[in-house]
Image (cartoon, helix red, strand yellow):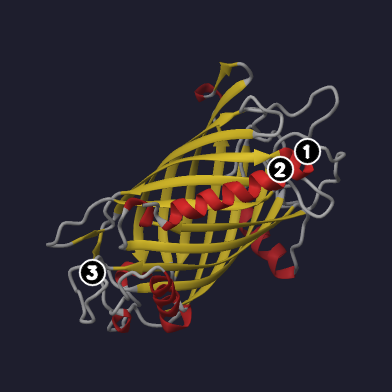
Amino acid sequence: MKTPSRRMGAFLAAVIAGSCGSVLAQAEQPRQDRVHFFTYENDAHYRTDRFYTSGIEFSTKQANDSRGRMGHAFTGILCGWLDCDDSTPVTTQTNVGQLMYTPRDLSRPEPQPLDRPWAGLLYYEHSYAFLSPDQRVLTTLSGEIGVSGRLSLVEPSQKLVHRLLDRTIPAGWDNQIGGTLGLMASAERRTAREHLSAALGHDVQLHTATYWRLTAGTIQTYAAAGVAVVIGKDLPRVSPPPPGIGNKLGREATDAAPILTSCLAPWLRCTAFGSVEARVVAYNLFLDGRPGRNDPGVSKRTIVGDLVLGTRFDFPNSRSASHGPWFLQLKMTRRSPEFRSSLPVPRHRVAAVTIGTEF
């Protein structure tokens, strides 16, 4: 029997394939300066329903500078510290989403102090990406605001989905981490590493980048570092984190140098990616609870690691006058234990599906 995430992936693939087939014969369409995509994350693919159990995000990305006075002030201060050129961002992105965290046993209405607390977040995030003149360094600056507790709406969301899928109705949301207005700012820098990159033959490239990220606020505070690898054709020197691979940072096609395909078909481009990340966590609202409040909480681990593997399928001929080309991305994240308990705390795996349009 297929899991909900597998059924969704099959449905989305069919929709995109149909869209591609209907526009193969169209003439070249103009490029858009605004794109949209939707990401759905869930651990049901791995037959679990616990910890970080679900997330949804709607994203809009622009290729023009949409900063207002506050945006210019925010990026100007951070780029002054980070030595990045904030004159013109290569992309501006807005994300609106919801995160959901639960213990392993959803049927128990009483508190479960030895397991992960019930928690949720409804958030709005705005970010700017700046590319260095030599296109080797990508700096991304983000600001986020969100609400936790009942205003995050995770309780009715999960109960609705479980009723529709005839699954166990969660009974412990009265024990969730309480409501607060959270703020968070982050800065990430990715640097291309040519000595760790290579040509694999048949125009296939392997590009490697190292990155670090600093995040501070009342939602999470941590420092992260990692290595990311991308395999494909016509790759930019430094690729943004998924799902931005192959976007505006890549070169545009010309008659003399068309965009190369990666999957032996002119209507399909394939990209594979992976990363390894380690984080040093100082504060996590979803594990620590609100400071000074009587929230449920567990003893978090200071060091947490992620292994990410994924693949992305772009359909360049699906561009139309109203939208850019469609893409479908599949990603798997394997996360080390995030907290300590007298109960066993296993590693956790989450699958993600992203569907949307690109520039």
Query: Which residue is identified by label 3?
Result: 105
- Left or right of 147 in this view: 119: left
Percent position (x, y) of residue 86? 71, 52
Residue type marked 2: Cys
Q: Residue furthest top?
A: 201
What residue is at 60 percent from the left and 52 percent from the top? 355
Residue type marked 1: Leu
Residue type marked 3: Asp
Residue 9 bears which disc, if any?
none
What residue is at 50 percent from the left and 67 percent from the top? 184
Q: Nearer the viewer, residue 353 or 34?
A: 353
Percent position (x, y) of residue 95? 60, 63
Placement of 124 over or under 232, stated as above or below? below
Kind of element beneath mark 1: loop
- Mark 1 and mark 2: span between their CA atoms? 6 Å
Kind of element beneath mark 2: helix
Mark closer to the observer (2, 3):
2
Name the N-terminal-most of marks 3 and 1: 1
Query: Which residue is identified by label 1?
Result: 24
Residue 82 shows in the view: no
Contact between marks 1 and 2 (CB within 8 A): the answer is yes
Q: Nearer the viewer, residue 344 or 44?
A: 44
What residue is at 36 percent from the left and 73 percent from the top? 119
Placement of 259 over or under 43, stated as above or below? above
Q: Residues within 10 Å of mark 3 (few under 14, many from 20)?
A: some
Percent position (x, y) of residue 328? 59, 46
Kind of element beneath mark 3: loop
Query: Which residue is identified by label 2?
Result: 20
Placement of 307 over or under 101, stated as above or below? above
